[in-house]
Image: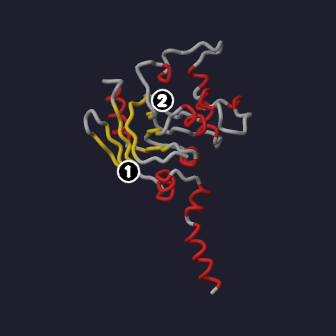
Amino acid sequence: MDKFTKITSSAIPLAIENIDTDQIIPARFLKATDKKGFGENLFRDWRFDKNGKINNDFPLNDKRFSGSILVAGDNFGCGSSREHAAWAVHGYGIKVVVSSFFADIFKGNALNNGVLPVQVSPSFLKNIFEAIQNDSDTEIEVDLENQEITILSNQNFESFEINSYKKTCLINGYDDIDFLVSMKEDIQAFEKARVE
């Protein structure tokens, strides 16, 4: 995984609540066993109509919006536990998803796949949506080390919570195995002390 410390980006607003994992990546695309290609089908049934024609009204297709931050409505990632939803978000190029609530399984899958879920208060989420509506080029700064998210146009900011272990992994670009390898000397010293 790539190291994550701070990101500054414009954002894609998706003001829809209760977006479930089947909407994020429809079940018919779950046949693959590796992560490649999932980003192409992120929100497939919303981005395209039944005939495969692009839906220009959908925010991910709207040329006004771009960036590596997705701002979504409350209860993002509910539904089934498919890890493919996090693969699709990451594969599309989204590095941060902001919402006022995340389903626990999606949150864990996102963190395991290099996507930072930033949970903010409903009022701050509303503030972000309003800022983007007023100016589609509004930039958001997400500072993982200090656990703060800032709307740069008005300097409003809020702190967010993250599991300390997952924070360490993201900052260093570790998956679970990489983290264990990074602790190799400490583990060996512990084992040696137990033998003696």
Looking at the image, residue 178 lies above or below residue 19: below
Q: Secondary structure at mark 2?
A: loop
Image location (x, y in percent) of residue 127:
32, 34
Name the N-terminal-most of marks 2 and 1: 2
Q: Which mark is residue 103?
A: none
Looking at the image, residue 115 lies above or below residue 24: below
Q: Which residue is mark 2?
A: 16
* Gap between marks 2 and 1 measured at Cα: 25 Å
Image location (x, y in percent) of residue 109:
58, 46
Tell me the quarter of the image containing the C terminus: bottom right
Which kind of residue does numbered mark 1 sit on?
A: Gln
- Viewer-proximal residue, 20 or 145? 145
Seen as rendered, the residue at the extreme bottom is 196
Q: Residue at x 34, y 32 (%)?
A: 139
Q: Residue at x 63, y 15 (%)?
A: 52
Q: Which residue is mark 1?
A: 147
Q: Quadrant of residue 140?
A: top left
Seen as rendered, the residue at the extreme left is 154
Q: Residue at x 40, y 20 (%)?
A: 64
Seen as rendered, the residue at the extreme right is 31
Q: Residue at x 57, y 45 (%)?
A: 113
